[in-house]
Image: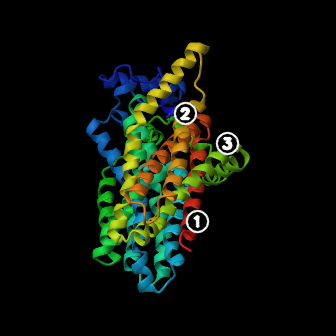
Amino acid sequence: MSSDESERGLEASSPKSDITDPLKIIRDVEKQQDAGQSFLVGWDGDKDPLDPRTFSAARKWFYVAVVAVGSLLVTATSSLYTSCYEQLIKEFGCSQEIATLGLSLYILGLGVGPLVFSPLSEFYGRRPIYITSTVFFLIWLIPCAAAQNIQTLLVARFLNGLSGSAFLGVAAGTVVDMFIPQQLLLPMTIFTGAPFIGPALGPLIGGFINSYTTWRWSFYVLLIWAGVILACVLLVPETFHPILLSKKAAALRKSTNNNEYHSASEVARASKTLSRALLTSLYVPFQLLFLDPMVLALSTYTSLLQGILYLFFGAFQLVFGTNHGFNLWQVGLTFLGLLIGNLIACSFNPSWHKNWMWLIRKKKEKHGAEYKPEPELRLPPAMVGSVLVTVALFWFAWTTYPSVHWIVPIIATVVFSIGFFFVFQGIWTFLVAAYPKYAASSMAVNTTTRCIFAAAFPLFTDQ
């Protein structure tokens, strides 16, 4: 978005002083060509119809809903699979650990994908990435549903996660593209809430499916869901500002026969290649991880919490299935605690924003109007969340016995889910504020390390 601010309309010398007089435009263009001037193309003020921020409210919210539900689908697909374990072990004659690999490999795919899709979107835009990703996500669901052996299922699960990861690596940018900063709070709350709700929603849906039909119907349902998302994605236009401005500059070059029109993004992209962008995307995040203690500490902490979250997918069956005698769909319903906790945590976003504004105001009163907010002012949600998750884990661990009513550990998961969301909200906003130049890299390595932990932890849940 920083390039947009410098690209507000054509430069003052460009031929836009009288757009109603074609002859004047032609004369102005001829003068500029003779002078050999270069023109920087940007948005024509705040009302440019090509600017995604000028879309109607209905269009914006439809596009937000598409990317949010797409993210929900991708994350729900990871955990819905856990409801298939019993049938998979019986049909394919594999061990619990091998069946669990289907979950782990999918999550690994989710972690690797954003490192590739993010730089690709810088060159080709967000729309081609969405369409390609969703198509391949749907395609790789087919061998999952039709697999005749566990090997086929495991390979397809990894490729399925890799394909779907574009929604986690690119979709946030789509939301930012369409709203000015003052309007971002609500749409970003909805979007960021979806990937957290997905893991809790998957076992809830999968519990009912696998209780009353075969495990293959879990993937049939996902195929239908992915097909609907694909149809909706085809309706989402390109929103990435640099790509749109490049197209606008190309149209001006063609219509005026003047090759001096260009956008700032064209100049920036001309100085780097796709291979260099991919290399940077793979190198810089891990350079931050290993050389910056703060990135290492925060990524390790969020990774540990993500791993614990995915431990629940095995632990819930032990606690509520073995200790309390719940059947499969009843175990699925116990994930409502995590889902409700996420919804409650999302509702606190406006309050945390007000708290941040209050802290800034107090600091300005103390240090003067020139004060610039420190990134650490974004951490209060993480501070509160870290206490909640610790309390919730002790609460859950000490109430898993058959003698304790089943609702007590479920309430603990509500508290855990609230704290979990608060921690991630505080740490993510801190990373973006603390490393503005490397915000994408810091978030990418955080995502990758979280997925590695989330992939590993389920493998030793049930021993």
**Amino acid carrying mark 1 in the image:** Ala
Q: Residue 378 got which mark? A: 2
SS label for mark 1: helix
* Residue 2 position within the rendered picture, expressed as x and y whole percent measured from the top left: 52, 32
Q: Local crowd at mark 2 within 10 Å, few (<14), some, or many (≥20)?
A: many
* Residue 432 position within the rendered picture, expressed as x and y whole percent measured from the top left: 56, 38
Choose the circle earlier in sequence order: 2 or 3. Answer: 3
Residue 326: name its quadrant. bottom left
Name the residue that disc number 3 marks.
Answer: 294
SS label for mark 2: helix
Q: Nearer the viewer, residue 460 or 168?
A: 460
Looking at the image, can residue 77 be seen? Answer: yes
Quarter of the picture containing the C terminus is bottom right
Name the residue that disc number 1 marks.
Answer: 456
What's the distance in space between the residues labelled 2 and 1, CA to CA? 30 Å
**Amino acid carrying mark 3 in the image:** Met
Residue 98, above or below 275: below
Q: Local crowd at mark 3 within 10 Å, few (<14), some, or many (≥20)?
A: some
Looking at the image, can residue 160 be seen? Answer: no
Q: Outermost residue toward the front? A: 403
SS label for mark 3: helix
Q: Nearer the viewer, residue 41 or 152?
A: 152
* Residue 167 position within the rendered picture, expressed as x and y whole percent measured from the top left: 44, 53
Question: Residue at point 47% right, 20% down?
Answer: 12
Choose the circle earlier in sequence order: 2 or 1. Answer: 2
**Amino acid carrying mark 2 in the image:** Arg
